[in-house]
Image: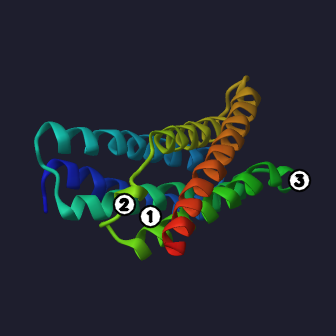
């Protein structure tokens, strides 16, 4: 219960929960700086919890359950609150891909829950790992764009571009999972 991979997952769960509170109380560059630091730490724990679970042979059922929950909470909560940081005029640039990403995460989670762990057909695809990386980098660049850099507009556009790329990958992978579930239900 308290091995290194699970502790890293707990850190991600706590960080994912703190981020919306920080944005709600301080959506300025200062609050976004703290959110950026927390998000980067959480993103790093996402890589290392799996690495240490394999390397130290500390994989656990608790970790297998909490890891995807922590990943989804981190991305979904940040995307839900990130639009509060930017000018309302351009929120659709973040809002539309965020809707696709959030809807996909909920649908795929529901599919996996319905079919249970006995179906390896719904195992994480390698392209889904790229999707997660694009999501994390897009959020990092969007948060960097809130800081007082002279080139922050470039971070913003790069973040928006990566967010839309991750939304496209999200729709693609979500459709694969949905098609697989329909095929199983027909049989």
Is residue 129 positioned above or below 23 on the image?
above
Q: Which mark is residue 17?
A: 1
Q: Which mark is residue 162?
A: none
Find residue 1 and report its image quarter. Answer: bottom left
Residue sitting at x 88%, y 53%: 89
Is residue 29 found left or right of 154 in the rendered image?
left
Is residue 69 found left or right of 63 in the rendered image?
right
In this rendering, the count of numbered labels is 3
- Residue 157: x and y in percent read 75, 33
Sequence-first tag of 3 and 2 = 2
Is residue 43 found left or right of 77 in the rendered image?
left
Could you tell me if the residues under marks 2 and 1 are in contact, i.e. CB atoms within 8 Å? yes
- Residue 33: x and y in percent read 54, 42
Residue behind mark 2 = 13
Residue at the right extreme of this rendering: 89
Residue sitting at x 30%, y 67%: 118
Q: Which mark is residue 89?
A: 3
Residue 98 seen in the current view: yes
Instruction: Compute the Cα span from label 1 to label 3.
Output: 27 Å
Is residue 76 found left or right of 85 in the rendered image?
left
Residue sitting at x 75%, y 57%: 95
Q: Residues within 10 Å of mark 1 (few under 14, many from 20)?
A: some
């Amino acid at each position: 219960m308290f091995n290194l991979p699970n502790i890293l997952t707990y850190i991600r769960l706590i960080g994912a929960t703190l981020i919306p509170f920080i944005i709600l109380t301080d959506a300025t560059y200062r609050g976004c700086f703290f959110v950026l630091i927390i998000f980067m730490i959480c993103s790093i724990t996402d890589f290392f919890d799996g690495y240490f679970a394999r390397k130290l042979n500390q994989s656990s059922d608790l970790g297998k359950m909490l890891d995807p929950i922590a990943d989804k909470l981190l991305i979904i909560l940040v995307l839900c609150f990130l639009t509060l940081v930017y000018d309302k005029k351009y929120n659709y640039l973040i809002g539309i891909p965020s809707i696709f990403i959030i809807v996909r995460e909920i649908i795929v989670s529901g599919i996996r829950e319905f079919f249970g762990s006995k179906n390896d057909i719904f195992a994480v695809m390698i392209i889904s790992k790229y999707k997660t990386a694009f999501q994390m980098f897009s959020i990092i660049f969007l948060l960097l764009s809130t800081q007082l850099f002279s080139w922050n507009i470039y971070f913003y556009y790069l973040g928006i571009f990566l967010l839309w790329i991750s939304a496209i990958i999200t729709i693609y992978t979500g459709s694969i999972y949905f098609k697989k579930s329909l095929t199983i239900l027909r049989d």
